[in-house]
Image (cartoon, rainbow, N blue to C red):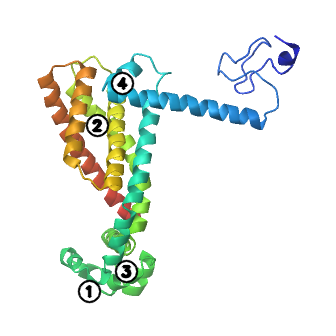
Amino acid sequence: MTKSLRSHRGEVCLNCGHQLDVSDRYCSNCGQLNSKEELTVKQMLAEYLAGLFSYDSKLFKSIKLIFVSPGKLAQEYISGKRVSYVNPFRFFISMAILFFILSSYLVKDDIEGLSKNLDINDVEELDKVEVDTTKINQSGRLKDLLKKNQDITFEEAQVKFQIDDTYYSKLKFIIEKSFYKFLNEPQDFFDYLFPKLPFFTFFFIPVFTVFSKLLYLRRAFTYTGHLIFNYIQSTVFFILLIVYELVVVLIDYEFLGIFSLGFIYYLIVAKKRFYQQGVVKTVLKTFISSFFYVFSALFILTLMVFASLFFF
């Protein structure tokens, strides 16, 4: 080791405080370079590019494996080969965010069209389904005000329309206010909702994995093993959805039926390799789990939409 290199090395890691020797090039505790040298722009760029190319290499290797050998990436990751591939959770979040960003951009024109074509004063169906509006305001003046002004507070409405200070009245006021605000500003509502969807899917999968664990109760997999597999399959689904949306936009060709059958086939192959079961049992369990996934996801998503509308 040269004298110049030795002069830049320390006896304590600047990152974690671990004791070092000047002969140590890297910290044995956290892996950081043992250097007291003042940080330069060149070093920052070198670290950034090294991390970027390392991630890209893992990403391309992971994508290649999930399509060449469905189900194998989960096997590799669980068996301990983790440095070579992208973390399943990070992989999933990246693809989910990319998909929802793309989707929000693609549906923006449709939502703007809805906003232009929707005349809030002609929403007659709402009046038919309201529950005893006389409990809040018999003359309908409050409803007319909410159509024009969604900034009014419950306290202001109480003073103006003599509304009862009850939980029911407050809840109904909030629901009506949010609904009219949505009708007036649908784009703002979707802008409010879309950023939350990746995190909804991220936290939904652990719930669904409980069902997977029960469905494959006799298989020697831990909950974490099922979780990794489900995250990877959901990542594949988002990647395919991204490709599907781009194809539809670029060449204006709808192939939803082919897409759905293709993904189901992929899922069957992946489950067969991962869970090591026969074709008939794999197909049956794939359809059972897919039905439960879609049903429960739609149910929870519906609750999320209503909750978002409530707080919008």
Identify the residue position indicated by label 2 in the image: 208
Q: Earlier in the sequence, mark 2 or mark 4?
A: 4
Mark 2 or mark 1, whichever is nearer to me: 2
Q: Which amino acid type is marked by label 4?
A: Ala
Give the Cα distance between marks 2 and 3: 40 Å
The residue where tag 3 is placed is 146
Residue at figure coordinates x 76%, y 38% from the top left:
41
Identify the mark nearer the N-term, 1 or 3.
1
Is 23 situated left or right of 162 in this image?
right
Q: Earlier in the sequence, mark 2 or mark 3?
A: 3
Residue at the far front: name it: 251
Q: CA distance from mark 2 to mark 4?
A: 17 Å
The mark nearer the N terminus, 1 or 4, is 4
Q: Position of residue 42 (x, y in %)?
A: 75, 34
The one nearer the camera, 206 or 84, is: 84
User: As rendered, which of 217 and 277 lies closer to the eye?
Assistant: 277
- Judging by the rendered image, the residue that carries numbered circle 4 is 74
The nearer-to-camera label among 1 and 4 is 4
Q: Quadrant of the C terminus?
A: bottom left
Q: Picture quarter containing residue 170? A: bottom left
Residue tagged 1 = 138
Identify which residue is drawn at 14% across, 23% down: 279
> What amino acid type should be assigned to the residue bearing mark 2?
Phe
Identify the element where label 3 is drawn.
Answer: helix
Q: Residue at x 46, y 41 (%)?
A: 94
